[in-house]
Image (tube, rainbow, N blue to C red):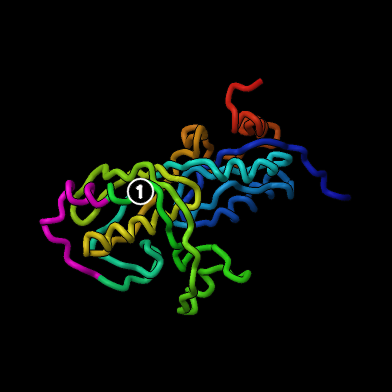
C-alpha cells in the first residue's frame, strides 16, 4: 500500500543542534512528517546551533523572502589561533601568544571597523558553488579557487565579554555573512589570529529562537501535535496580518 502523504503547511522554527548540517535537519523533518516538500531558509554550519527556519508544504515558496532577512548571532572565539576553516573544526595552521596589551577596548575598537556596508569573500570551506562544485570539495583537496566577493552589511559587531584568550560576541548582519570570516579577519587585524569556537543564531528578523523547538523534541511529538509548531507562512513575514 502506498504511503499516505501528509498535508502539513507553514514555517517551522527548529533549534538546530551542533554536529549536523542544515540538510540533515531537513531530512529528519521530512521523515517525521512523511513529506517531500520541505526546505530551509538559510544554512547553518554543522558547528552552529540555533534558529533554523524550516519551510513545509506551500510555505517553501517563501524561501527567497525569508532567506533575505537580517540575522542575529551570538558566539565565542579564541584569539591566538588560525585554522583553514576559520573555526575550531578546521586544521590549526598557526598558534600565537596573546599579549596583555590586547584589551576589551582594543578588541571592540577593531570590531567597530567591520560595521557598515562591505564586500566579503566566501571562505574556501563553504557550500558556495563554483562551476557547480561546492568550495569545500576544493578545500578538502588543498585547492584554493578564485571567489567573487559578496555584498554584506554588518549593523553591529559587539564584544560581550573577554577572558584571554577567549571572548563572546554579538553580530547583527545581512544574509550571506560568514561569521567565522568576521572572527578570522578580526584576528588578522589584532595580529594574533582568531577562530570561531561556538555560534548560535538567535533571530532572523521577527523570528526568534525563543519560539523554536529543539529538533529531538519535535521528532518525539505525535503527528497529531505537529500543527501547533507550524506558523502560517504569511504570519512569518507580516505578524499580526489576518
Q: Is residue 113 left or right of residue 91?
A: left
Q: Is residue 235 left or right of residue 199?
A: right
Residue 80 seen in render: yes
Question: Can you give x and y, in whole percent of width and height, for residue 230 in the image?
Answer: 64, 33
* Up-down relation of residue 235 to residue 97 (above or below): above
Say which residue appears at 26% left-offset and 45% top-offset. 159
Say which residue appears at 15% left-offset and 55% top-offset. 102
Secondary structure beneath dot 1 equals strand
The magenta stretch is 95-110
Mark 1 is surrounded, within 10 Å at the Cα level, by few (under 14), some (14 to 19) or many (20 or more) other residues, namely many
Q: Name the residue furthest right.
A: 1
Question: Can you give x and y, in whole percent of width and height, for residue 21 in the image?
Answer: 54, 56
Examine the structure image and report whether residue 98 is included in the region drawn in magenta: yes
Say which residue appears at 44% left-offset and 40% top-offset. 202
Residue 219 seen in render: no
- For the C terminus, the quadrant is top right
* Up-down relation of residue 95 to residue 235 (above or below): below
Depth check: 9 or 105 in front? 105
Q: Name the residue furthest left.
A: 100
Q: Is residue 103 left or right of residue 2?
A: left
Question: Can you give x and y, in whole percent of width and height, for residue 141 in the image?
Answer: 49, 79
Question: Can you give x and y, in whole percent of width and height, for residue 239 in the image?
Answer: 58, 26
The residue pinned by badge 1 equals 75
* Up-down relation of residue 167 to residue 143 (above or below): above
Number of marks:
1
Examine the structure image and report whether residue 172 is included in the region drawn in magenta: no
Say which residue appears at 25% left-offset and 50% top-offset. 167
Depth check: 19 or 52 in front? 52
Amino acid at each position: 500500500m502506498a504511503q499516505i502523504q501528509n498535508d502539513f503547511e507553514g514555517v517551522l522554527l527548529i533549534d538546530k543542534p551542533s554536529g549536523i548540517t542544515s540538510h540533515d535537519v531537513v531530512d529528519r523533518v521530512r521523515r517525521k512528517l512523511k513529506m517531500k516538500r520541505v526546505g530551509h531558509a538559510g544554512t547553518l554550519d554543522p558547528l552552529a546551533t540555533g534558529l533554523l527556519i524550516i519551510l513545509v508544504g506551500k510555505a517553501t515558496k517563501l524561501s527567497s523572502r525569508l532567506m533575505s532577512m537580517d540575522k542575529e548571532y551570538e558566539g565565542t572565539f579564541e584569539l591566538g589561533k588560525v585554522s583553514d576553516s576559520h573555526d575550531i573544526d578546521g586544521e590549526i595552521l598557526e598558534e600565537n601568544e596573546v599579549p596583555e596589551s590586547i584589551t576589551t577596548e582594543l578588541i571592540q575598537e577593531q570590531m567597530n571597523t567591520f560595521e557598515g556596508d562591505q564586500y566579503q569573500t566566501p571562505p574556501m570551506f563553504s557550500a558556495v558553488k563554483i562551476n557547480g562544485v561546492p568550495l569545500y570539495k576544493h578545500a578538502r583537496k588543498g585547492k584554493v579557487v578564485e571567489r567573487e566577493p559578496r555584498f554584506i552589511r554588518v549593523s553591529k559587531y559587539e564584544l560581550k565579554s573577554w577572558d584571554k584568550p577567549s571572548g563572546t560576541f554579538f553580530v547583527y548582519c545581512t544574509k550571506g555573512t560568514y561569521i567565522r570570516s568576521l572572527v578570522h579577519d578580526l584576528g588578522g587585524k589584532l595580529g594574533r589570529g582568531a577562530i570561531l569556537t561556538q555560534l548560535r543564531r538567535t533571530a532572523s528578523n521577527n523570528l526568534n529562537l525563543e519560539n523554536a523547538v529543539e529538533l529531538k523534541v519535535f521528532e518525539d511529538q505525535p503527528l497529531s501535535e505537529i500543527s501547533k509548531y507550524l506558523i502560517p507562512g504569511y504570519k512569518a513575514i507580516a505578524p499580526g496580518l489576518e
